[in-house]
Amino acid sequence: MNDDFVNSISGVLVVDKPVGLTSHEVVQIVRRGTYIRRAGHTGTLDPRASGVLVVLLGPAVRLSEYVSASDKRYQAVIQLGKTTDTYDADGKILTTNPVNISEEQFEEALHQFVGEIEQVPPPYSAIKVKGRKAYEMAREGEEFDLQPRKINVYSLELLEWAPPEVVIDVYCSSGTYIRSLANDLGKTLGCGAHLVGLRRTKSGRFTLRDAVPLRKLREAFDDGSWYKYVIPAAEALSDWPSVELSEEAIDSIRHGHRVAGEPGIGKMARGISVDGDLVALLEFDPSNNEWQPKKVFS
């Protein structure tokens, strides 16, 4: 595969991350396999978690702040009756309690976490406290407080009731910690709980149906067919409205100039070429009905 072809790629690889690897390690595997140095993921999955990991390639990495902010969906396995210092199965068990809870009581507690809620991140997280990562301070036994953050939980559904383990479907905003959700749920139920398994089934518009198992992707790196799995950059924000740009408009946008637009499309849009390539992210200025380029890609 020639360098010109590799350098021209700007798109998305949706990887089904296996348990046991960090998100960063998956990105490193993608960099080595594609020879594209500019690559990054759009939302960390813990090593213990599996599922949808969106990796942006080439100029598409500049979409990261928008794709990272997308909603997420998970299947979470929670064990009732035990709490740990990390809120998951990697931690030290702190308390053990009997589980005398009915399915109805569990569902009732679940509903209390739907909507806009405040959530305190786990102490073992990458949140920074006075410039230091919380998990580093927690490992050293330091005392500190993490501030609650507003998150949105759009839906919670009980998928499997087999106490002490339960499986739930979580549809939530970016920035939600499922470990904290499990721990908080245990507090509400009075028996304690922690997360024992997590699979991300959706990130933004990408689902497991779009995802390529890492094993299959490695094989494609070896035989040079990996480019077949690259999704065009424009698809990463396919829930945004699009504006088809003429050659003249594309030339203006590449030089940082505004182009005429029509109201009613939305505040932000994708500027697309006739061939369907992503040219720019555009912001609408209603004062003079023009599209202002926010990020230009070609």
Image (cartoon, grey):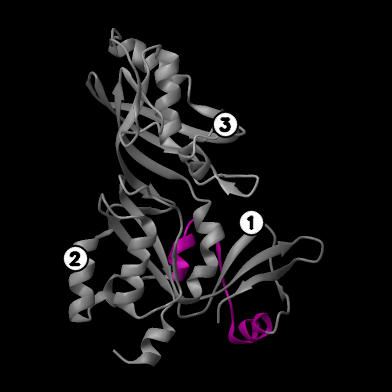
- Mark 2 and 1 residues: CB-CB less than 8 Å, in contact? no
The residue located at (61%, 82%) in the rendering is: 250
Query: Image check: 231 left or right of 132?
Result: left
Determine the residue positioned at 39% across, 34% down: 170
Are there few (<14), some (14-19), or many (20+) residues within 10 Å of tag 1?
few
User: Marks 2 and 3: in contact by CB < 8 Å?
Assistant: no
Q: Quadrant of the C terminus?
A: bottom right
- Magenta residue span: 233-254
Residue 101 in view in this figure: yes
Please give the residue where the numbered disc 3 appears in the rendered image. 143
Q: Earlier in the sequence, mark 3 or mark 2?
A: 3
Q: Which residue is mark 2?
A: 216
Where does the N terminus fall, quadrant-wise? bottom left
Is residue 187 located in the magenta-colored stretch of the structure? no
Mark 3 to mark 2 CA distance (whole Å): 44 Å
Q: Which is nearer the eye, 286 or 107?
A: 107
Please name which of the two marks, 2 or 1, marks the residue nearer to the observer. 2
User: In the image, residue 277 lies at what x, y percent?
Assistant: 47, 77
Whichever of labels 3 and 1 marks the residue nearer the N terminus, that label is 3
SS at circle 1: loop
Residue carrying label 1: 266
